[in-house]
Amino acid sequence: MIANIPHSIYEAQENFKLKNYSVTDLVVHYLTEINNKKNLNAVLETFDHEALQAAKIADENFKSGNTRLLEGIPILVKDCILVKGHVASAGSKMLEKFVAPYDATVIRILKENGAIIIGRTNMDEFALGGSGENSAYGKTLNPLDETKVPGGSSSGSAAALAANLCLIALGSDTGGSVRQPASFCGVYGFKPSYGGNSRFGLIAAASSLDTIGVFAKDVNDIKLIYDIIGKQDTFDGTTTPDSLRTKIKSKNNFKKIVAYPKEYIESEGIDSEVKNNFIQSLETLKLKGYEIKPVSLESLKYALSIYYIINTAEVSTNLSRMEGLRFGGGDVGEIKNYQELFSKSRGKFFGPEVKRRIILGSFVLSHGYFDAYYGKAQIIRAKMKEDFANLFKDVSIVLMPTAPATAFVSGEKRDPLTLYLEDIFTVPANLAGVPAISIPSGFDSAGLPFGLQAMAAFGCDENLFTFAEDFKLDII
Amino acid sequence: MAQLGIEDIKKLADLAKIELTDNEEQEYLKNINDILGHVSQVEAFKSEALSTYDFDSQVRGDILPERQDGLSFGFDREIMLGNISNKSSDNSVKVSKVIKK
């Protein structure tokens, strides 16, 4: 076992170079720890054989001095991102036997740069949920307090990183699924601009909202990973063309001016300790020379409503392919026709939250209600994008807490609407397509971590890393 | 704003091709009506708020101009072949036998 486990990519690679331990030592350490901490249910499967083979190659590369940017860095991956030759179940019984036929683009790029994929992490089924309690393979525990939820839907990735079971973890973020669990587990969680990196090989939840994000304990690691994976991909037509990225960045140089939506922060249901921590964070920034601007964003008050209209509409469409024939399924007993096969398979192998969202999504898209719900939601979403675009003409960063409360007791929130309200601060970034990061910002009276969420203009992900580095508190 | 009844849930489940138990139908009826009660706030939004909003220039024009309307080779042959699981040495793709004698 390794005594001083690394907390950053730089630290790990320095130790490899100084021969304090080898890549193989570190991979074995993590695989052993994953096994020792099985009770957390953060990791669904480890890829021991491949990981150890890759570690051997990395050790040889360090010996020869011929190393790549992520040489020897062990990474865990959310169960909805395809890793060739391994099951990708998206936390669902529906895809229990689905073996990925290819690597997702982000996985291919990480491997090409020397990273070692050591396993896949637990998650809320099909990325639908914000607590880590909706997986078909059992709930994940928060390593900081095992009676509490780790957040979701990238529950296993956040919990595994916080429990020191890997150095970096990947997640997906459709409405806060990286940032909220990062906040609950006391680590950094980043979602890029929509189209910032490729989603080829990500099992889709809601296509106009989905992004692949990164968890780390050091913001410089997130910056490094995003420098590597944040590229146009011909396999994903929604990725921003490389030629435009420089143009966008050049228009938005970082300024020490931040805004926060004052009415939104005063919303009902926000924990008083969260509010106080947020105010303290603003004070810290003032001391660091930041100008703070309270602003009003009219469209924000509709954010949760339109999110749950658009999300369920897209989920019901995307998951229609899961019918037990092309994708998923298993034994459903005797059937008379294909219709019955589809209904029985979906009834048996989807969990309750998935079924609920598909039915709601089918309703908001149905004839007679489409304009009142989906059409209206898209109009408000356009207004929200406009509000953010205008705001970012004057400021570099918009701040909010990441979540309205710290990690709650597992099983405490059974009512779906109550759980949906937890997403109040995270969904706007997905709706507007802008990048956002959750930064650890202290602890509550019970010792649970707070997260400060920073958002930047579309395509200006770099500004988040500059801000997070500036804000950094030595609390991890 | 709409309030659903149990027949609506049955109809939606049928449209969505999901077999539900009686208990699930009752549970989803309550959940979905609660959620619809919350999202009904979108009714209050006045579309006129967008009257001066130029979607093309605000969201696309400045940031993501439309791409050229022409043919381009978007897929890299080597990357695509590299992603194939079962490949012979001459780059032919091996597929599972689907018809058995």
Image (cartoon, coloured by chain):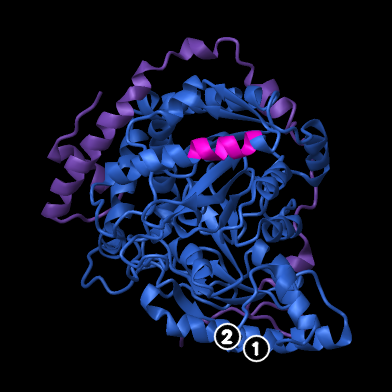
Chain colours: A blue, B purple
In the rendered image, the vertical position of residue B14 relative to residue A275, given as above or below: below
Position of residue A306 measured from the top left corner of the image (x, y, whole percent): 42, 32
Dominant secondary-structure state across the stretch colored magenta:
helix
Residue reaching furthest to the front: A287
In the rendered image, the vertical position of residue A44 relative to residue A182, given as above or below: below
Displayed quadrant of residue A68 = bottom right
- Mark 1 residue type: Asp
The residue located at (53%, 68%) in the rendering is A161
Mark number displayed over residue B71: none
Position of residue A227 measured from the top left corner of the image (x, y, whole percent): 76, 56
Position of residue B8 measured from the top left corner of the image (x, y, whole percent): 19, 38
Which residue position is annotated with label 2? Answer: A29
Position of residue A112 measured from the top left corner of the image (x, y, whole percent): 75, 71
Residue situated in front as seen by the camera: A53 or A27: A27
The residue located at (55%, 40%) in the rendering is A281
Residue B42 visible here: yes
Query: Mark 2 falls within which chain?
Result: A
Which residue position is annotated with label 1? Answer: A25
- Mark 2 residue type: His
Residue situated in front as seen by the camera: B89 or B26: B26
In the rendered image, the vertical position of residue A62 relative to residue A440, given as above or below: below
Magenta stretch encompasses residue B17: no
The residue located at (25%, 70%) in the rendering is A332
In the rendered image, the vertical position of residue B51 relative to residue B71, given as above or below: above
Asked if marks 2 and 1 touch (Cβ < 8 Å), the reply is: yes
Left or right of residue B9, residue A210 in this image: right
Question: Dot 1: what SS?
Answer: helix
Stretch in magenta: A278-286
**Quadrant housing the N terminus of chain A:** bottom right
Q: CA distance from mark 2 to mark 1?
A: 6 Å
